Amino acid sequence: MLRQLEGSRAVAEAVGLCRPEVVCAYPISPQTHIIEGIGALVKSGALEHCEFINVESEFAAMSVCIGASAAGARAYTATASQGLLYMMEAVYNASGLGLPVVMTLANRAIGAPINIWNDHSDAMAVRDAGWIQLFAETNQEAVDLHVQAFRLAEELSMPVMVCMDGFILTHAVEAVEMPTQAQVDAFVPPYEPRQVLDPADPVSIGAMVGPEAFEEVRYLAHVKQLQALERIPAVAAEFAAAFGRTSGGLVHGYRCEDAEVIVVALGSVLGTIKDAVDELRQRQVRVGVVGVGSFRPFPEAALRDALGDAATVVVVEKALAPGAGGILARDVTMAAAGGGAEVRTVIAGLGGRPITKASLAAVIEAAGRGELEALHFLDLDHTLVDRELARMGTQRRSGPAAENILRDVGVVSARVR
Amino acid sequence: MAMQPVKFYQTGSFAVGNRLLPVRYRTVQSDAGRTNSLNSGHRACQGCGEALGARYALDAAMRAANGKMIAVNATGCLEVFSTPYPETSWRVPWLHSLFANAPSVATGVAAALRAKGRHDVRVVAQAGDGGTVDIGFACLSGMFERNDDVLFICYDNQGYMNTGVQRSSATPPAARTATTEAVGPEPGNPFGQGKDVARLATAHGIPYVATATVAELHDLEYKVHRAMEVHGARYLHVFVPCPLGWQAASSDTVRLARLAKETGLFPVYEAEHGEVTSVSRIRRPLPVEEYLRPQGRYRHLFAGEGRPDIVARLQAMADANIRRYGLLGPDEGAGDGPATLADDPAPAAGGGR
């Protein structure tokens, strides 16, 4: 049934339909509405046989999920930004132990300076943690990815992170087709753990492993990711057959036929990019888009196919590796290697900075002309940066940089046009 | 006819000689049907107090849980010496996740069991003092505050022994560790620091808190049993000497544990819902020096002219404990263990309740 829902509420209901047995939460913007929604489902009795636990930190939240999952329960939590960093040690531990926890990441910037708005710094910080990382383009896809996430996690016995852009998706109200309980029950069978804490069959989980076997255990984690590369499209295809709509999968191409420039991105910004591409196509610019649905495992082969013969690849990404540049872009460069395409990185949308169609169109056209620098910062105010650099160059005690820049910016409302 | 209560002093402590007890009061450890939860063959040091405490505590918990129990372990000596891959000494379902999160992991296990309707399976979490009083304290306090159905056992050897004897917030004043060396005008760990987590647990108002030592193993078993009789968050703080970290003889582990209690440095008591309900009284008060001298970590207090001023400060701490908990109280019956066994309702009567 098509319903007008806030993204967080839709995800809360979707998670509820997957019948989690333990949901653990610590509030952080912009994740809060998701856990509030699930909490209400449990408290009202609508979601039965589920324990909802309010903990004292994200580290505890993931740890509770680890214990619950190892004891054979379907476990779920959600977080964002600083919360993800605070639980980092447990994030690695969940995947290291092979526990199929599902977590929503309401993508948000990482401080300092503190910033609650959207970018992908948080997801990128855990890209090597051994989790599957799926990115939702729309709220519909966010709902659908959660149903697929429980299935993938439990099939492969590894944790899955569903990334959805904070505020842009979590707080956006739009029409969403909610699956029925019967549909989800048919798609997500009861959890059958590979390993479980059972008094009738005692096992030790989490033993110490030395150099004699550590590489083998880690290699198996890589093998699981390679298996996920097979299972993600297969589960997405099954989902399409069962639910009648396409969601998930490894990569999604849009108007890539005969494209000379292809833009690659993650998450909700793909919508804006598609609009920009539509307009450019009307002006006969040969440009297409490839959305990366699965960032981990990284679909190198599928992406290479999707990029085809494009001469230029522009990676638009909401994250920055200071001192290196793009993060997604480096993976895309690996995928494009040998194909002859030039890869350009555009850092955009940091800390919630709007990514406008106009700005995107300008960089795409510049790329098409071969005039886009290798690493470009979209809509960066060089004047502000230069003033702060000048201060730092002339005085030792130049003060806190973020505060200086804010003072230079002046009253924010004066910039709203 | 005047009645004279029977007293059992054969072992030089309040511990009752096992063979003198009716079968139902004998230790779990003397039962051939015990679990051997922490089985032989592990790699603890000779004389390890933690291995001794863990074996008694978990076997007692297993008996109380009718063999249906899941154990969660923090990182630390106990985890490392018991599970060098691919071997394991655990004969109970056992999960190790991280150093700081054992209380939360145990909460998760308990939540899973509740969600699945497995009310017959109990959850025990265990950690050393580092995993309890320092890095694990936030998770522990959260678990207490929510009153999750977990028995948490801290094996306190007063330092980070697994990493080479560094100072924790359970390290006592004046003790030498690798990060509080016995040098300078105030050698060893500073005075005025440290965290008393048994008191903090009591302040959370949880259903049951107890301290115990590996000198009175019958008492330890009793307290585990008592803890398992109730649900909600429960905390057991077990004093476990570490021959390596304390630079003490392996054969002195039990003696040092007894001296810690008999000097008043380690008060042994129970608390329920925020109130102290019983204390193990000191039979013959001993000066702290008797406890300090056998330990190399206090050697600097006695070398050369010695530091009687520091010993006096430690004695003052013991005296304060004795006053606070009434460890020398007049109520002789309470301090003498089960005086009349026939009237004692507890299945495993320990000394000094």
Image: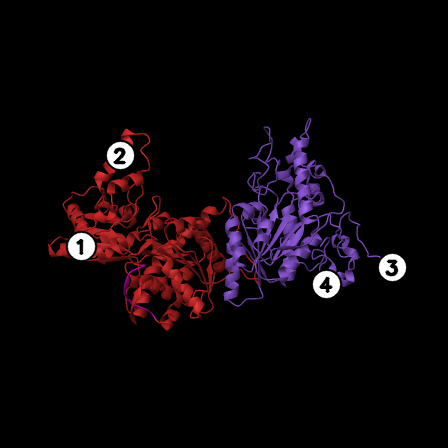
Chain colours: A red, B purple
Mark 4: which amino acid? Pro
Residue farthest toward the right in the current orientation of the protein = B1
Residue farthest toward the left in the current orientation of the protein = A283
- Could you say which is closer to the camera, residue B155 or residue B285? B285
**Compared to A110, does B346 lie above or below?**
below
Q: Are marks 4 and 3 on the same chain?
A: yes
Q: Residue at x 10, y 54 (%)?
A: A283
Residue at image mark 4: B345
Q: CA distance from mark 4 to mark 2?
A: 78 Å
- Could you say which is closer to the camera, residue B189 or residue A76? B189
Residue at image mark 3: B2
Query: Mark 1 or 4, which is nearer the eye?
Result: 4
Q: CA distance from mark 1 to mark 3?
A: 102 Å
Q: Are marks 1 and 4 on the same chain?
A: no
Numbered badge on residue A389: 2
Image quarter of the C terminus of chain B: bottom right
Q: Are marks 4 and 2 on the same chain?
A: no
- Could you say which is closer to the camera, residue B151 or residue B343? B343
